Amino acid sequence: MPELPEVETIKRELEKAVLGKKILGVIINNPCVVKHRRKEDFVNGLKNTTIRNILRRGKLLIIELSNGKSLAVHFKMTGQLVYPGDGKKSRVSFKLSGGRTLDFNDRRLLGELRLVDDWRSLEFVKALGPEPFDLTADKFKEAVSARKTKIKPLLMDQGFISGIGNIYAAEALFKAKINPERSAAGLSDKEKTVLFKTIKDILNEAIRCGGSSIDQYVQLSGEPGDYAKQHKVYGRAGKACFICKSPVKRITLGGRGTYFCPKCQK
DNA sequence: AATGGGACCTGCGCGC
DNA sequence: TGCGCGCAGGTCCCAT
């Protein structure tokens, strides 16, 4: 599911819906997603704690609890958090005060739930690059110039910049009119400036729309996000480019399907 | 350093 | 209708 805008959407909705609620119980329907050898450590550490704070780092959601621990949630490809949940597709359900349940659904079971003492010391977190909104244009341009790799895989490199995934890398490069196979270091000063601004614009607009629902992603309420309607190239192989009407192309880059308009993106 | 492949998983849509 | 294949918002690990 989720790139930065989808996780940010969930984060904001969780703040409204579950902040201050107590976790009364935890039901593990599929232990695969709980990354603890002893599942009872996970359950016992969560039980009877209160949800104090919700944060996001890159694509990672962090729920801080009253006992000082945090629940780190990585959605990977098909993870969902739904509240109030109905339990039907739930891999793990959290029974909250007030009588409702927060469901973690995950069709492909690639998602990860971890209860940790200090989320900042997670290796995954320490390896994350800066948030797009914390970065200055100058820093972005300098970092891009230092890398010879192709620009699209670089944008998706979470150690380089955190939160951008396959959809938003494709959409940002389309809007910035940059071919995804271009060398990062080979971009002009102007292109780097435009790309940086475009990334932030697209992420902001996607957040405003509640994210992109393609297959599995839904907002906390279970409603789809609206931004997929605005996709210009992602998932549009063979269809006419909205600008020049020539067909959108799909190639594989860094092992990922990559959509772009060969005519508009030079 | 960069790139390619496979692994982890389930399940959808497509062509035959 | 049924089957096999490719593909999927991510990340990690290994080989070259």
Image (cartoon, coloured by chain):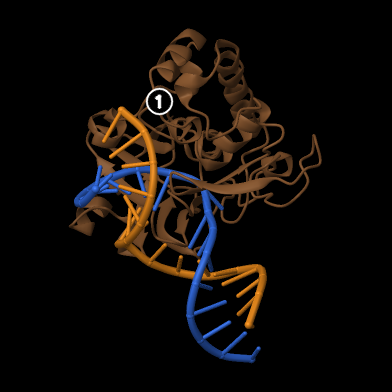
Chain colours: A brown, B orange, C blue
Question: In this rendering, is residue A113 above or below A66?
Answer: below
Judge from the rendering whether residue A245 lies leftward or rightward of residue A142; answer left or right: right
Say few, some or many: other residues with alpha carbon within 10 Å of mark 1 (under 14 / 14 to 19 / 20 or more): few
Q: Tell me the element at label 1.
A: loop
Tell which of A151 and A53 is nearer to you.
Answer: A151
Q: Position of residue A61 (x, y in %)?
A: 41, 38
Tell which of A7 and C12 is nearer to you.
Answer: C12
Q: Position of residue A161 (x, y in %)?
A: 42, 26
Question: What residue is rendered at 81% in x and 41% in y?
Answer: A245
Q: Please tell me in which quadrant of the rendered image residue A21 appears.
A: top left
Q: Amino acid at mark 1?
A: Lys
Judge from the rendering whether residue A100 lies leftward or rightward of residue A160; answer left or right: right
Q: Quadrant of the C terminus of chain A?
A: top right
Question: What residue is rendered at 44% in x and 37% in y?
Answer: A59
> Is residue A94 in view from this perspective?
yes
Q: Residue furthest top?
A: A138
Residue designated by label 1: A148
Tell which of A33 and A229 is nearer to you.
Answer: A229
Q: Tell how many labels.
A: 1
Question: In this rendering, is residue A113 above or below A125?
Answer: below
Tell which of B6 and A89 is nearer to you.
Answer: B6
Judge from the rendering whether residue A201 lies leftward or rightward of residue A162; answer left or right: right
Question: In this rendering, is residue B4 above or below A6?
Answer: below
Q: Position of residue A8 (x, y in %)?
A: 52, 34
> Is residue A135 in view from this perspective?
no
Question: What residue is rendered at 25% in x and 35% in y?
Answer: A122
Q: Position of residue A49 (x, y in %)?
A: 32, 41
Question: What residue is rendered at 62% in x and 52% in y?
Answer: A214
Q: Please tell me in which quadrant of the rendered image residue B10 appears.
A: bottom left
